[in-house]
Image: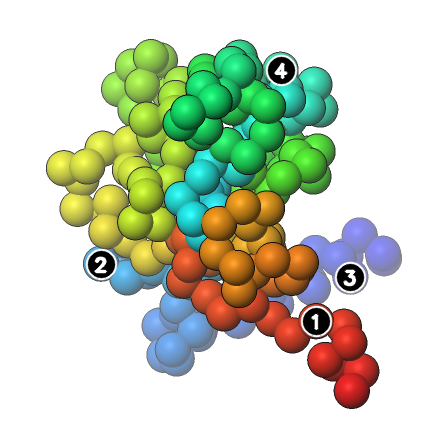
């Protein structure tokens, strides 16, 4: 009897979806790519390497993300920052940074492991390629541009303009250890990639006052 109950329950769900699809507005499919549904805030899409508001790269080439990755799909090589023109605030920066998207399971552990919030994930899910080589994202595809925009793997693709590229799955720390004074000592967070596109959040003291 339990089996029959489960069967009838499933049949009822199927029937409801069919009725909604034909007579109601409960469509279960949309015309893609013209229409697409917004993703949940914590959707795990392709990665991005972030910058501080002063334009410096957040990645310090520590390789912790590569160590944490269960799929072993991140390859990082750090290089000492040139003293005259440092790329990041640390001793080193991510000179080589690659993610093999064919192996990535989008678990987000690299994001968790990163001590500087250099790597976060966007809402972009369009990653099909016609060859394996294009599935390996390098600094060219991952590193945020100085204006805060995120490069797309295929710039000629109309989908490159999709809003997912402008949304991150989590908080990006805005605090710059060097540069913009307004951010000094302030732990400010934002949900979208892009340097200097947000105002620092109030400090705990200001919230308590
Ligand atoms: S999301 Fe997971 S599998 Fe993908 S690169 Fe990060 S740690 Fe590796
Ligand atoms: S992305 Fe983060 S964890 Fe990975 S090498 Fe750069 S600073 Fe280290």
The numbered dot on residue 203 is 1
- Which numbered disc, 1 or 2, marks the residue that appears first in the sequence? 2
Residue nearest the viewer, comparing 78 with 167: 78
The answer to whether the residues at label 3 and label 1 have Cβ atoms under 8 Å apart is no
Between discs 2 and 4, the one toward the N terminus: 2
Q: Nearer the viewer, residue 48 or 50?
A: 50
- Give the residue drawn at x 68%, y 24%: 64
- The answer to the question of whether label 4 and label 3 lie on touching residues, with beta carbons closer than 8 A, is no
Q: How far apart, in angstroms, are the residues tagged by discs 2 and 4?
A: 35 Å
Give the alpha-carbon distance from disc 3 to disc 1, as whole Å: 56 Å
Tell me if 103 is positioned left or right of 196 in this view.
Answer: right
Q: Nearer the viewer, mark 2 or mark 4?
A: 4
Q: Residues within 10 Å of mark 3 (few under 14, many from 20)?
A: few
The residue that label 4 is drawn on is 72
Can you tell which of label 1 and label 2 is closer to the viewer? 1
Among numbered discs 3 and 1, the one appearing first in the sequence: 3
- For disc 3, the marked residue is 5
In the rendered image of this protein, does residue 50 appear above or below residue 104? below
Residue 125 location, x and y as percent?
Answer: 41, 42
Label 1 crowd bin: few (<14), some (14–19), many (20+), radius 10 Å: few
Among all residues in the image, which is located at the extreme front?
A: 84
**Label 4, ligand 1: CB separation under 8 Å:** yes
Distance from Cα at disc 4 to Cα at disc 3: 45 Å
Choose mark 4 or mark 1, whichever is in front.
Answer: 1
Q: State yes or no: discs 1 and 2 in contact (Cβ < 8 Å).
A: no
Which dot marks residue 34?
2
Q: Earlier in the sequence, mark 4 or mark 3?
A: 3
List x then y, in percent, for residue 162: 28, 53
The local crowd at label 2, few if under 14, some if 14 to 19, many if 20 or more residues have their Cα within 10 Å, is few
């Amino acid at each position: 009897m339990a089996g029959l109950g489960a069967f009838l329950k499933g049949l009822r769900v199927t029937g409801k979806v069919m009725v909604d699809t034909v007579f109601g507005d409960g469509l279960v499919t949309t015309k893609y790519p013209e229409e697409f549904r917004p993703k949940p805030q914590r959707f795990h899409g392709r990665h991005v390497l972030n910058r501080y508001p002063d334009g410096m790269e957040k990645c310090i080439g520590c390789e912790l993300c590569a160590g944490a990755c269960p799929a072993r799909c991140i390859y990082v090589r750090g290089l000492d920052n040139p003293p005259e023109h440092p790329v990041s605030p640390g001793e080193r920066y991510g000179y080589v940074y690659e993610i093999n998207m064919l192996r990535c399971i989008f678990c987000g552990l690299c994001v968790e492991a990163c001590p500087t919030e250099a790597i976060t994930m966007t809402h972009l899910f369009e990653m099909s390629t016609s060859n394996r080589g294009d599935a390996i994202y390098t600094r060219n595809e991952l590193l945020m541009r100085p204006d805060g925009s995120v490069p797309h793997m295929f710039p000629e693709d109309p989908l490159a303009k999709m809003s997912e590229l402008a949304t991150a799955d989590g908080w990006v720390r805005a605090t710059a250890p060097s540069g913009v004074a307004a951010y000094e000592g302030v732990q400010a967070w934002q949900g979208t990639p892009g340097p200097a596109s947000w105002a620092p959040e109030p400090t705990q003291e200001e919230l308590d006052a």
